[in-house]
C-alpha cells in the first residue's frame, strides 16, 4: 500500500503540471541531441561516489521491537504504534568519480538479434550501415572479467576492467549503428559503454564474444566508439 500511495502522489502531482513537465522533457531532449552532435563537450561518467545532500531529512517513523529468534538467525521485528521522528543524511548526490569520452556513435559488429532487439526495446534509434566505411574508433580490450558469485534476476552480473586504444577499422554494410544525437542518447551510452555499471556487458549480452570456449584471454569488445562526428550511410532499423 505504501508503494501504491507513493505512485498515486507522484501522478497527482504530475497531473496538475503537464505543460511544465512537457517543457522540461523537450528541453532535456534538445540538450541530449546537442550533446551527441558535439560529443567532445562533455565526458560520460562510468564510476560514481554517492554523497549526502547538503541538509539531512527527517522521516516520521515508528519504533520496532526487536527480539532474538530461538536458534539464531535474523532477529524478529514487531511493529508498534509508537511514533519516532528520525533525522538522517539523504544519500542522493551522485558525483562522477571516473569518466570516459562521450562518443558521437557506437558501432556493433556482431549480428546478434538479441542485442539489436534489446536496444530497440529501450526505445533507441538504431541503424544499419548500407555501405562499408573506414573510421578511426576506440577499441575496448578487456583485461579482467568477473561474474558475481550469486545470481541476480537470472544473471551473474559482470564486472569488467580494460583499456582503450585508437585504431582505424573498416566496418562492413550491416554493422549496427547507434548515434548519441537522439533523445535517449545517454541511455545508449549507459547500455553500450563496456564499463557502465548497468550496461549490456554487465547483463551478460556479450559474454560469448568476450570469452570463447577454448581461448585463454579475452577478445576485444565488438562495440566500437566513434568519437568524432562523421557522415554515415545508414537506414533505420525496426522492431
Image (tube, rainbow, N blue to C red):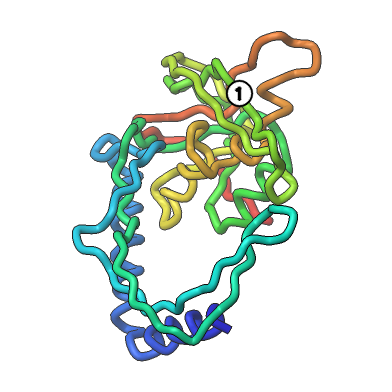
Name above or below for residue 209 compared with residue 115. Answer: above
Tag 1 secondary structure: strand
Q: For residue 70, what is the image quadrant?
A: bottom right
> Front-most of 66 and 2?
66
The residue tagged 1 is: 145
Q: How many marks?
A: 1
Q: Is residue 39 left or right of residue 195?
A: left
Q: For residue 183, what is the image quadrant?
A: bottom left
Kindly give the residue lying farthest to the top in the view shown: 216
Image coordinates of residue 173 in percent, x first then y, are: 62, 31
Name above or below for residue 15 compared with residue 103. Answer: below
Q: Residues within 10 Å of mark 1 (few under 14, many from 20)?
A: some
> Front-most of 166 and 8?
8
Kindly give the residue lying farthest to the left in the view shown: 54
Residue in the picture at 46% in, 15% down: 168
Image coordinates of residue 140 in percent, x first then y, are: 50, 21
Image coordinates of residue 162 in percent, x first then y, are: 49, 19
Image coordinates of residue 239 in percent, x first then y, are: 68, 56
Q: Could you tell me which quadrant the N terminus lies in?
A: bottom right
Q: Is residue 90 left or right of residue 65?
A: left
Q: For residue 45, what is the image quadrant?
A: top left
Kindly give the residue lying farthest to the right in the view shown: 213
Residue in the picture at 72% in, 37% down: 112
Residue in the picture at 42% in, 89% down: 12
Name above or below for residue 184 compared with residue 48. Answer: below
Amino acid at each position: 500500500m505504501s508503494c501504491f500511495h507513493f505512485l498515486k502522489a507522484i501522478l497527482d502531482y504530475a497531473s496538475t503540471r503537464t505543460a511544465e513537465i512537457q517543457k522540461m522533457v523537450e528541453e532535456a531532449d534538445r540538450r541530449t541531441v546537442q550533446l551527441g552532435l558535439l560529443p567532445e563537450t562533455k565526458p560520460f561518467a562510468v564510476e560514481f561516489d554517492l554523497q549526502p545532500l547538503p541538509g539531512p531529512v527527517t522521516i516520521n517513523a515508528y519504533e520496532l521491537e526487536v527480539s532474538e529468534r530461538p536458534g539464531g538467525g535474523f532477529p524478529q521485528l514487531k511493529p508498534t504504534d509508537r511514533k519516532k521522528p528520525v533525522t538522517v543524511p539523504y544519500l542522493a548526490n551522485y558525483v562522477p568519480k571516473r569518466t570516459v569520452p562521450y562518443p558521437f556513435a557506437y558501432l556493433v559488429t556482431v549480428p546478434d538479434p538479441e542485442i539489436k532487439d534489446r536496444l530497440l526495446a529501450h526505445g533507441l534509434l538504431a541503424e544499419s550501415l548500407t555501405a562499408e566505411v573506414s573510421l578511426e574508433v576506440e577499441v575496448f580490450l578487456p583485461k579482467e572479467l568477473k561474474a558475481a558469485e550469486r545470481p541476480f534476476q537470472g544473471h551473474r552480473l559482470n564486472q569488467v576492467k580494460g583499456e582503450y586504444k585508437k585504431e582505424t577499422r573498416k566496418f562492413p554494410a550491416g554493422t549496427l549503428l547507434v548515434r548519441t544525437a537522439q533523445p535517449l542518447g545517454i541511455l545508449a551510452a549507459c547500455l553500450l559503454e563496456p564499463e557502465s555499471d548497468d550496461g549490456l556487458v554487465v547483463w551478460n549480452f556479450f559474454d560469448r564474444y568476450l570469452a570463447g570456449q577454448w581461448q585463454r584471454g579475452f577478445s576485444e569488445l565488438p562495440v566500437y566508439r566513434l568519437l568524432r562526428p562523421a557522415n554515415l550511410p545508414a537506414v533505420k532499423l525496426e522492431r
